[in-house]
Image (cartoon, rainbow, N blue to C red):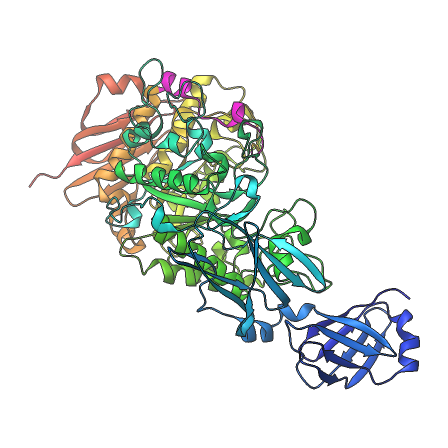
Amino acid sequence: MERFVAWIDDVHLLTIHNAEQLLPLVEKDPSPFVVSEDRKIHYKIKGIEIESTNGVKMTFDEELPLGENLHLCWAGKNIPVYAGKIVRTDWFDERYTAFDTEFGAKCGDTETVFQLWAPTATSVKVIIQQFTFPLEQKPRGVWSLRLEGDWHGSTYEYEVTVNGNVHRVIDPYTKGLLANSEKGVLINFSKTKKVADHRPSIDHLQDAIIYELHVRDATVHPNSGVVHKGKFLGLTEKNTKTKNGFSTGLTYLKELGITHVELLPINDFSRVDEWNPEKDYNWGYDPLFFQVPEGSYSVSPNDPVSRINECKAMIQAFHDEGILVIIDVVFNHLFIQKELSETTFEKIVPGYYFRFWEDGTPSNGTGVGNDLATERLMVRKLILDTIDFWLREYKVDGFRFDLMGVIDTETMRQIVKRVKQEPFPILLLGEGWDLPTNLPSNRKATRWNADQLPDIRYFNDEFRDSLKGSTFNTSEVGYVNGKGKYFERLPFLVSGSCIEEFSQPFVEEPTQVINYVESHDNHTLWDRLSISNEDDSVEIRKKMHQLATGLTLLSQGVPFLHAGQEWFRTKKGDENSYLSGDDINQLDWDRRESEWEQIEFIQSLIAIRKAYSVFRMRSKWEIRKRMYILKTPFPVFGFTLFGDGETFAIFTNPSKNLFPVQLPSSGRWEVLATNSDRKKTMQTKIIGEYTTIEPFELIVLKKQFIH
């Protein structure tokens, strides 16, 4: 007969599989019992039921203890008893949640305190360098050790015995790592650099202009003029230039005028050899450890203090240049090579950290093999502790949540509550897509539940797809590249996608929407236009591109630009470049040189948005009061914004035809921005009430009030 295991699946339920083979045991002994080897206590079995499909179900009156060595004594056999589905019950969360405990290894000058949450483990030891120390089992599943001495810089691992298996694991709360996540490292943060408390000022989060950037992409190009190419330190270097003297890197970003840089994941991730990072490439959406900077971005990946200091130096450099830092966080899944059992989480508390379906198969709404069970209290705590750590120690200014629709709404509410404790406004945004994870729809942090999360901003895929065509149908066109297709949607989109008079609201308020037409995912806008509009000339496609980027910057809501979008970034047609290497992904600083006029146009739109608050209104009430959609000949679209001392008129023409347009009123109109080469140099003013708009032109006009 094969080796059996009895699984504690509920408070009063044991399950043993392979029912047919257990029939002889039932006949021999109808009164089995459970023994705790640690305390020599017996627990009587109340009832036995055999199911051909689900095995043997045993019920008992008393609650079996977890974190002890248990055996089921049955007909002379000792069957081990392990924690099964019990870890996914409300009872377990209520009994074992330890929200007030500071987990991880808190390393000081004279002692280090270790605390690990492992309620189903029967033994936990810590191995520091070559020394081994046992941890003491505490209430609520906590294992703890206070160790005297200065252990800063020492490697450490836990040896955890759980469900009959002994595993060496890295602390999920580790703050330092050796290269390639070989071992955790104890860090005394008083011996690391500090990021200054002072941050660049921003009056309101609605003033944000976000620029999405991958650390390696930013500076790895041969013509970046950066010494530490592809590294954290590469984004600390000032006054870097191309060979022809054009600004690059950090200095370029400051000149562009954006307020926030959003960094693709900078915490420890998989699939890049940190010893030889040039051989591999990854966007960073393969998370391993949430509280450690990624080693491949460090010049010294095996020096954990150095990589911490380099990451902090980068954040400080951004702050010094007036740029706030958002980090992209991946709390929806964990990287696995083959099986969940390989992960640190499964080795410490099997079955707890991930979502499962009723049949025991992992939920996979993320499409990468697993979904983190954010709704479970100790998973939520890990997420909240991680948010808290990056705020306190690294002084980041915002978080972008990857596949946020897989995260539960209560976790997001708790994150909002935490960031509101900061004396500075923290920007929260995420992907609100509804994915097939094992979580009720009303508990998902999707944009359909935006009314539950008024402080979260959502990526507006309706804006994206209406301007250029559906992302998932490359032959489809939109407003800018389809001769005005979806023209009827534009009033809704430019007004923040929240005005009921125009359409069913995407969000409740303009403070919840992120407008964009391009991101790291899918084709760049330039590559997409090259497919959907291959019969159009390069110059016409550039004009279409300018219309899309311009509308992104001039619409109500927070605008989001993908790095290099302002110079027609291409990934050579690669739609999913997450592993595609530098040749595809690097920011091409040669292209920055050749497209400097396009960059100046985008700079002018950014400057307009920053100079006039009417382009970044904070409520739909104010939008209704100050925005008016103009009557224009199709497919020209126009709208007016009424400021406190001036009126603005914005027109776009997604066609090859010249059109006459009527301005909101007669007078002297100043051309603030246009992508028309002729008007840039020859028409800086428009007198009267009528003008023309050229093919594929975007123009911004201002009329000063006369008092």
| x then y, percent, for residue 526 | 48, 26
Q: Nearer the viewer, residue 99 or 138?
A: 138
Can residue 633 be seen here? The reply is no
Q: Position of residue 37 (x, y in %)?
A: 71, 76
Q: Is residue 678 above or below residue 202?
A: above
Q: In the rendering, at what x and y percent does residue 253 appear?
A: 32, 31
Q: Which residues are magenta?
A: 578-595
Direction from residue 466 to residue 85 in the image, left or right: right
The image quadrant where one finds the N terminus is bottom right
Among all residues in the image, which is located at the extreme top?
244
Instruction: In the rendered view, tell whether residue 590 sits above or below residue 263.
Output: above
Q: Is residue 158 above or below residue 653?
A: below
Question: Is 407 rendered above or below residue 538?
Answer: below
- Observer-nearest residue: 351 or 514? 351
Q: Is residue 256 visible?
A: yes
Quarter in which the C terminus is drawn: top left
In the image, residue 594 lies in the stretch drawn in magenta: yes
Q: Quadrant of residue 374?
A: bottom right
* Image position of 371 (left or right of 699): right
**Residue at the (67%, 53%) spot, across then down:** 340
